[in-house]
Amino acid sequence: MGDTPKTVLAAKKALEARGHKLVSLENLIDSFEAFDVYSDLLLADNGKYIKEMLRNDEIGPSAQTLNLLMSLPSWKRRFLTRILPLSDRMRITASAGLDAEQAGGLYSKIGDKDSLRDGILKNMERYSLDLIISPVMPFPAPRKDVAYNLFCNNVFTVKT
């Protein structure tokens, strides 16, 4: 966590002192549903976009595992998730994006994304908000040797 709570509270105090109204993100969106929808949409191409973005970068163990899984054809990933006795972490990682791979699933996920967006906009109107400021993750960039555990814990929490 480092100085994250201290930094967030200092920013909150400074924004409120300038007359801004702050509302907890939980009041705007179901973050678990959002993570599920956006991860499936991001990986709907079997991770090709992410692999291209990371092509020349040094990546941590979590991304290496995901990269390896994304190199498998989707039928093999489905086999892994349904037949083999995988840990929950590996099963969740291996199944990421499979729901949005076919046209029907992709359209369904796009519909879910649109519903999430509309819900956020309605809540912004309800609370008279004109801006959302949020961290990408609730913690600073982790060391590479612990990133895998943080990633898998987040995915496990979302999918169960």
Image (tube, helix red, strand yellow):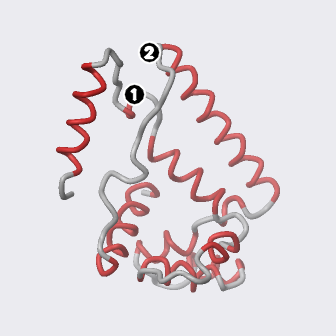
Q: Please give the count of numbered marks on the rendered protein.
A: 2
* Structural distance between the alpha carbons of marks 1 and 2: 9 Å
Residue 14, placed above or below residue 1 = above
**Residue at image coords 21%, 57%:** 1
Q: Which residue is mark 2?
A: 127
Residue drawn 70% across the image and 63% down it: 44
Q: Which mark is residue 119?
A: none
Q: Which residue is depicted at the point 42% across and 57% down?
A: 160
Amino acid carrying mark 2 in the image: Tyr
Instruction: Give the camera-side residue of 135 and 97.
Output: 135
Q: Amino acid at mark 1?
A: Asn
Identified at 43% across, 62% down, the residue is: 155
Q: Quadrant of residue 146?
A: bottom left
Circle 1/circle 2 CB separation < 8 Å: yes
Helix, strand or loop at label 1? It is helix
Can you say whether 95 is above or below 7 in the image? below
| Element assignment for label 2 | loop
Q: Quadrant of residue 122?
A: top right
Q: Residues within 10 Å of mark 1 (few under 14, many from 20)?
A: few
Marks 1, 2: nearer the viewer: 2
Residue in front for this viewpoint, 1 or 118: 1
Residue 35 location (% of width, % of height): 50, 51
Q: Position of residue 85 (x, y in %)?
A: 46, 84
Q: Is 146 rendered above or below residue 3?
A: below
Task: Give the image location of residue 42, x and y in percent.
Answer: 64, 60
Point out residue 136 in the picture as x, y percentages from the top left corner. Answer: 43, 51
- Asked whether, in this view, residue 2 is left or right of residue 119, the answer is left
Q: Would residue 54 appear left or right of 26 to someone viewing this image?
A: right
Quickly name the residue at label 1.
27
